[in-house]
Amino acid sequence: MNAAPEIHGLMAEFSETAPLLAAAKRAYQAGYRKMDAFTPFPVDGLAEALRRKPSWVPLIVLLAGIAGGAGGYFMEWYAMAVDYPINVGGRPLNSWPAFVPITFELTVLSGALAAIVAMFALNRLPQPHHPVFNVPHFERASTDKFFLCIEARDPRFDLAATRAFLESLNPDAIAEVRE
């Protein structure tokens, strides 16, 4: 016997950004915390309505850039002043102006690579399957539809009560999201 798939949540479909934004604000005011929105383009104010926490990516990029720059400078200093010291033209062995281009390039390279890795890791990508992919018409989230999903793991989630709440938001459609 095949058991019915476990429910992941309920998803409301909207045709425009304003109703989606209002729905996200009302859902948060109603006490829902485990929810997500899917839109074809960035919607101004949606992250604030969902109360998203700031991203860790900028801090990770900063730390990786500092580490890359310091590592590049140390590598050049060690090679020129410690491992193979040659006095050329009477310059000091630790001639920092000559080290600036490589230090800068390694700072940028380390920061860029860290940004890519952090973005993929923090977004849990690649993710070839997610339960929302099972929702009818969800492929339109990348073209012209806007979706708000309240997840079943939310403490306030009750299938009937959450469905009634979503219906009060006047969406175009409501669908159950199954695992």
Image (spheres, helix red, strand yellow):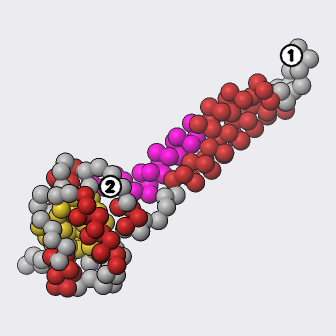
The span shown in magenta is 109-129
Mark 1 or mark 2, which has the lower sequence index? 2
Q: Which is nearer the eye, 72 or 60? A: 60
From the top left corner, tell me how far across and down residue 118 is, in percent. Answer: 48, 52
How many residues crowd around disc 2 within 10 Å: few (fewer than 14), some, or many (20 or more)?
some
Q: Residue at x 66, y 45 (%)?
A: 66
Going by the numbered disc 1, the residue's amino acid type is: Val
Q: Quadrant of the N terminus?
A: bottom left
Q: Is residue 54 visible?
A: yes
At mark 1, the secondary structure is loop
Q: Which is nearer the eye, 20 or 71? A: 20
From the top left corner, tell me how far across and down residue 9 is, in percent. Answer: 23, 74
Going by the numbered disc 2, the residue's amino acid type is: Val
Which SS type dominates the magenta stretch?
helix
Q: Residue at x 67, y 29 (%)?
A: 102
Mark 2, residue position: 43
Q: Quadrant of the C terminus?
A: bottom left
